[in-house]
Structure formats: structure tokens, C-alpha cells
């Protein structure tokens, strides 16, 4: 199955690529098997996602999925954004090859981690399901960090410097 036009467009010209300085929430996730890494940054006002950006190191589908989740989540309330699904990401893209569906899951995970970070930083109630998901993603993140620790350390240092 070839990539849809929307996947290619999102990959070639993502509108929401970049880093938000002083983000209200940051989600960082990765896939230990394929090596894709995503950072998702949120700006939240009155419990609504007002701005959202991403930085993704990965394949065409991972970058396109990152763009799709930013488009889907922008201007949604935190509670609405938490209800977004991988199917909505795939539909936004006009389909993904079955072997690349994990990229849509990664995009959802990045959004959920950014929301978790926002809620935690602001001492807000974290839904039980989101806590469970965070614990699972935290285990996966540690596996990825161990596998790619040298590269991730360099990327984290660059993020801290604002590069």
C-alpha cells in the first residue's frame, strides 16, 4: 500500500514542526523496535490546547502522524484531546500501510504524555487511565533511553540549549 497524498504532504510540509519554548507540557515517546522518537509540546490556556508543535526523528509515517495529531488536538480541550484515537490519526492521514500503524499509536502516546506532563506540572487531577498509560510509557522510555542513550543525551543537551 503506497502512502496517501496527505501522508506525503504532512511529511514534506509539516505546519506544526518545531519546539515551543516554555511549553506547558512536553511528551517524549519512542518505539524501541523501529527507533522513531517524538517530542510533542503544548501551550494550554483555559484548559484548551492553544498551540502544539512536534519534533520527530523517524520515518515518513512517524512525521506525518505527528503532524496529524497536532492538527487534531489544536483548539481542543484537554479532556477532548485525551479522547483522540489512533483511528482518528489514520483517518486524518487518509490511511497508513498496516506495517506503519504503530506510528499513529506513537503520536497518540506523545499527546497523552504531553497532557500528563501539563497536568502534573500544574498539580491538576490526572485521570486513572492516563496514569496507567504513563507508567507503561515510562517503562518503554527507559528501554529506549538505554538502547539509544548516547544519541538521546546529545539531543537532550541540544534541547536544553535551545538548539
Image: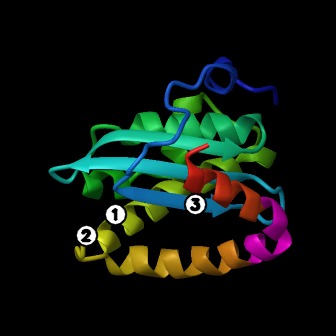
Left or right of residue 9, residue 87 in this image? left
**Residue 45 drawn above or below residue 132:** above
Q: CA distance from mark 3 to mark 2?
A: 18 Å
**Residue drawn 62% across and 55% down?**
106
Whether the magenta-drawn stretch holds residue 158 is answered as no
**Which part of the image, by quadrant, shows the C terminus?**
top right
Tell me the element at label 2: loop
Q: Residue furthest left?
A: 46
Q: CA distance from mark 3 to mark 1?
A: 13 Å
**Residue 140 drawn above or below residue 113:** below
Where does residue 86 sit, x and y in percent of width and height? 54, 50
Q: Main secondary structure of the magenta part?
A: helix
Q: Earlier in the sequence, mark 3 or mark 2?
A: 3
Residue 128 lies in what quarter of the image?
Answer: bottom left
> Range of the magenta residues?
143-151
Q: Which residue is mark 1?
A: 118
| Viewer-nearest residue: 77 or 21 | 21
Amino acid at each position: 500500500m503506497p502512502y496517501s497524498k496527505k501522508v506525503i504532504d504532512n511529511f514534506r510540509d509539516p505546519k506544526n514542526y518545531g519546539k515551543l519554548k516554555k511549553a506547558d507540557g512536553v511528551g517524549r515517546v519512542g518505539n524501541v523496535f523501529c527507533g522513531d522518537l517524538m517530542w510533542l509540546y503544548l501551550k494550554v490556556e483555559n484548559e484548551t490546547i492553544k498551540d502544539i508543535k512536534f519534533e520527530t526523528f523517524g520515518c515518513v509515517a512517524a512525521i506525518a502522524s505527528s503532524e496529524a495529531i497536532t492538527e487534531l488536538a489544536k483548539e481542543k480541550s484537554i479532556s477532548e484531546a485525551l479522547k483522540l484515537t489512533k483511528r482518528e490519526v489514520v483517518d486524518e492521514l487518509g490511511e497508513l500501510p498496516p506495517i506503519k500503524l504503530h506510528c499513529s499509536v506513537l503520536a497518540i502516546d506523545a499527546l497523552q504524555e504531553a497532557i500528563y506532563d501539563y497536568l502534573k506540572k500544574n498539580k491538576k487531577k490526572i485521570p486513572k487511565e492516563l496514569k496507567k498509560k504513563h507508567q507503561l510509557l515510562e517503562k518503554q522510555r527507559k528501554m529506549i533511553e538505554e538502547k539509544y542513550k548516547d544519541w538521546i543525551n546529545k539531543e537532550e543537551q541540544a534541547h536544553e540549549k535551545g538548539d
